[in-house]
Image (cartoon, grey):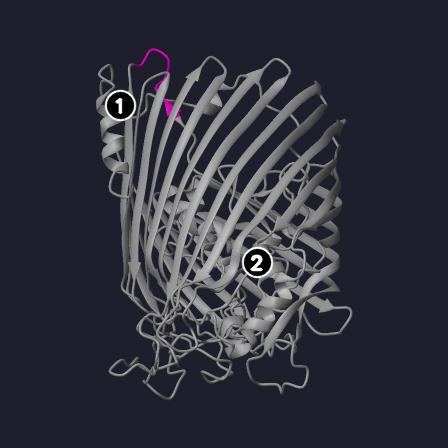
Amino acid sequence: MKCHITPLALAVAAALPSFVIQPAGAQTTLGEMVVKTSKIRDAAEPKEIGSAEIAAQHAITRDTASLLRDVPGVHLSGAGGVSSLPVIHGLADDRLRITIDGMDFISSCANHMNPPLSYLDPGNVAKIKVYAGISPVSVGGDSIGGTIIAETATPQFAAPGQRSLIKGEIGSFYRSNNNAMGGNLSATLANEFFSIHYSGAITTADNYKAGGNFKTTTATGRPGHTLPVDEVGSTAYKSLTHTLGLAFRADNHLFEAKLGYQNVPYQFYPNQRMDMLDNEQKRVNVRYLGQYGWGTLDGRVYYETVDHYMNFSDDKQLIYGTALNGMPMSSRGRTLGFNLKGDVYLTDDDLLRVGALYQHYTLRDWWPPSGTGAMSPLDFQNINHGKRDRLGFFAEWERHFGPQWTTLAGARYERLETDTNNVHGYGNAMGNQIPDAAAFNMRGHKRTDDNVDLTALARYTPDDMIDLELGFARKVRTPNLYERYTWSTWSMAAIMNNFVGDGNGYVGNMNLKPEKAYTASLTIDLHAADRKWEIKATPYFTYVDDYVDAIRLAPGTTNNQFVVLQYANHSAYLYGVDLSGNAVLAKTNLGEFGLRGLMNYTRGENRKTGDDLYNIMPLNGKLTFTHQAGGWNNAIELVGVTRKNAVSSVRNEIHTGGYFLTHLRTSYTWKNIRVDLGVENLFDRLYYLPLGGAYTGQGTTMGINGIPYGIAVPGMGRSVYAGINIKF
């Protein structure tokens, strides 16, 4: 499939003989087709990252999750070069609902190397909406931490009276530190009723270098393979993405189909024992959007296939000499989904949203035999034909009470059913494989959860200089298949089941209950009437009943080493505050000077054990001085993070020191050309990522004691970047 998408786009284009090239300005979009839109959209207003903000990041990162790093309350948990995990108020990964064009994706990997946003290149993203904390039930579900909605470009059509529209975009970038380079291409061909759009991107990078020497040896454990003492092993990657969209409109009705394909030939992980050596995703997304006198109807059906393969890169080595082909690990995920949503305009001040969804997900996770020793002669069945079915309904009422008050109240019900077949290990008794499998198989595996979400929000605007928003929510998440059904206590197998990057091993627990989070938040937004300055503060508090934390399977294990853990329900709370602001400092003959800033503080604690929660970002802030004059945009960005002292003791989480970074950025935009230049980490500081996990990027990575404990993953050293983007 990866070789035929572009030819298919050309073939369809060639089949439209009525098209004649017209100026790019002759166009109309879906937004012009819809003659009536909701007047009620003030409550639960998300942070939106638009095309201009995304374009400014194209040369800096090809990790779509990184586009969120300027959103208050959002941080990034380190993973592969294009697969970092967003964290909202200390909650990450499956605790967030992340959709792409209305599709819910699930990571089909024991290490969650293929999270939803990894399937989009930044060049293919039109906008992202982030609900940090409390989400309306219409965009939430099966999550407790917030919602991220990523969207590709809406279909574009020629304007009435114009025969056709043709436009496109091409770009390229380079970053010096890890020799990262790549390009993106998109093109649209349309008449007044039919539109075809293609976008594609490729990116590749070597291992990156830290801002100094963070290790004392160049050895990796593999004969003849060494790494410099400042090189961060297992950080190279290569990714190719393609999307083809077809759309047809008639009056107030839109029919759309999007075909997506991604192939990642390799993406290495500095905080995992394994590396991703192939990941192929194919997806089909069919949508109908209609405008009626009573409101809008939006429905879609989608199907996704994921085939995933892990083994060792050259930077890592298997500790067992009898293995002939490393430790191959394969997984296969299949997702079929259906979403239906209606917006009903009850009155000019009342909007009712109703909807339903169904999602059927299956997972096979197996590890083929290797050699003639411990990992033979059978497949190791990690998840044997697992199933996760999700059925949900919601209703939400939004109302204006005059010009000052807007309220929103909603309820959502979801029924989730998980199950899996019996399992077996490699077929030998090493590592307690046979007793563990027997104990797992003698139990019933099917679990059913009935989850109820509730949300209430109120926005009050007493005048044009202040907005207040108060919200309460109850959110519920059912554990994923790996949390419930991974079964082996053998340390070598357990460390393969780790999607938090702490170097430890994890064992599932079929008795896990759904997490139930109760959140209250208040947002105070002070601003000038013309928004020339703004200061926003959001304090929040979340109590989570049956929070999925971990306990040690060997309680007597000493600290300062990797351990084997089992998932367990506890209670926990998280609280903090997000501060952000911006201001125009001066307008002179030299241009406009401005200032942006944000600061985040989050604290999380296990109420049963008193332990700190894992992977909580310490106090951090960012200050950006901006300058704009004509086509020039310049910025000096200062980033500060305090020392990480609040760590999870049960996981032996690694402390990290505080640091201060400086970034320089400049860009110039002509009518259709944009050029970006900049330097990240200007002073080449050596620092360690607070959410980067434990460094397991090189050497012998198998076994709990296979590599030294206590090194966090370093951040990237100085890197000069350049990028160019041309629209036509």
Closer mark to the observer between disc 2 and disc 1: 2
Is 580 placed left or right of 374 in the picture?
right
Vertical arrangement, residue 399 with respect to residue 545, above or below: above
Whole-percent x, y for residue 204 in the image: 29, 58
Q: Is residue 26 rendered magenta in the image?
A: no
- At label 2, which amino acid type do we have? Asn
Region rendered in magenta: 156-162
Q: Name the one closer to the observer, 379 or 537.
A: 379
Question: In which image quadrant can residue 231 be found?
Answer: bottom left
Q: Which mark is residue 23?
A: 1
Please name the residue that numbered disc 2 is placed on: 422
- At label 1, which amino acid type do we have? Pro
Q: Is residue 159 rendered magenta in the image?
A: yes
Q: Quadrant of the N terminus?
A: top left
Vertical arrangement, residue 557 with respect to residue 100, above or below: below
Question: In which image quadrant can residue 441 be found?
Answer: bottom right
Q: Name the one closer to the observer, 685 or 246.
A: 246
Residue drawn at (45%, 83%) of the image: 707
> Which type of secondary structure does the marked residue at label 1 adopt?
loop
Residue drawn at (52%, 65%) of the image: 424
Q: Quadrant of the C terminus?
A: top left
